[in-house]
Image (spheres, rainbow, N blue to C red):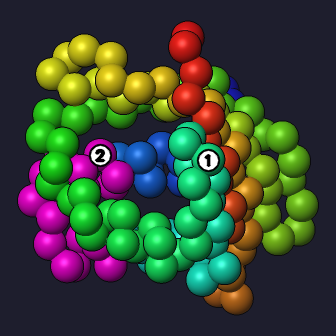
Amino acid sequence: MTKPNPYFDEVISAHIAIRQWFAGPADAAALEALMARFSPRFTMVAPSGAQLDLDGLRQLFARTGGGKPGLEIAVDQLALLDEHAVGATVAYREAQYLGGRPSSLRLATVVFERDAAGALRWRHLQETFCLE
């Protein structure tokens, strides 16, 4: 039996919430719940190379919520790259499907930090498109 990994659990849970945001009705409460996962100091390098901070991520989600009906997201190849007293770095592969067909495949690395209450927050995310 494998030991539960809170970082892997958060990657999976976050992608369920992200899929629901993109595929379903996009209301203000759902956006706030989704944004609560991210650190106030959040930064991201998108697959395109664009750089986002927390406000940029909020704008991206607000603009695209509900815009991908039928979206499915699969996450695998989770790897704990580093773990320390206040967080961890995790790598994973994310596949997106629209209408049952592959839409995008990306490799990602997330840096997690714990807030003052001990909750995990996404501090940094780097995504790269890949062919397979």
Q: Which mark is residue 19?
A: 2
| Image location of residue 17, percent across then percent down | 33, 54
Q: Which residue is tagged 1?
A: 49
**Vertical placement of residue 47 versus 87, above or below:** above
**Residue drawn 61% across the image and 60% down it:** 51
- Closer to the camera: disc 1 or disc 2? 1
Start-end of magenta stretch: 17-33
**Vertical placement of residue 5 versus 30, above or below:** above
In the picture provided, is 104 more to the left or to the right than 42? left
| Image location of residue 86, percent across then percent down | 82, 71
Question: Could you tell me if residue 32 is visible in this image?
Answer: yes
| Image location of residue 73, percent across then percent down | 36, 33
Kind of residue at badge 1:
Gly
In the picture provided, is 89 more to the left or to the right than 37? right
In the picture provided, is 49 more to the left or to the right than 67? right
Q: Quadrant of the C terminus?
A: top right
Local packing at callout 2 (Cα closer than 10 Å; few below 14, some 14-19, many 20+) is many
Kind of residue at badge 2:
Arg
Question: Could you tell me if residue 121 is visible in this image?
Answer: no
| Image location of residue 41, percent across then percent down | 66, 79
Say what secondary structure mark 2 lies in: helix
**Residue drawn 33% across the image and 17% down it:** 102
**Residue drawn 25% across the image and 15% down it:** 101
Q: How many marks?
A: 2
In the picture provided, is 46 more to the left or to the right than 110? left
Q: Quadrant of the N terminus?
A: top right
Local packing at callout 1 (Cα closer than 10 Å; few below 14, some 14-19, many 20+) is few
Q: Which mark is residue 89?
A: none
Say what secondary structure mark 1 lies in: loop
The Cα–Cα distance between marks 1 and 2, rounded to whole angstroms, is 22 Å
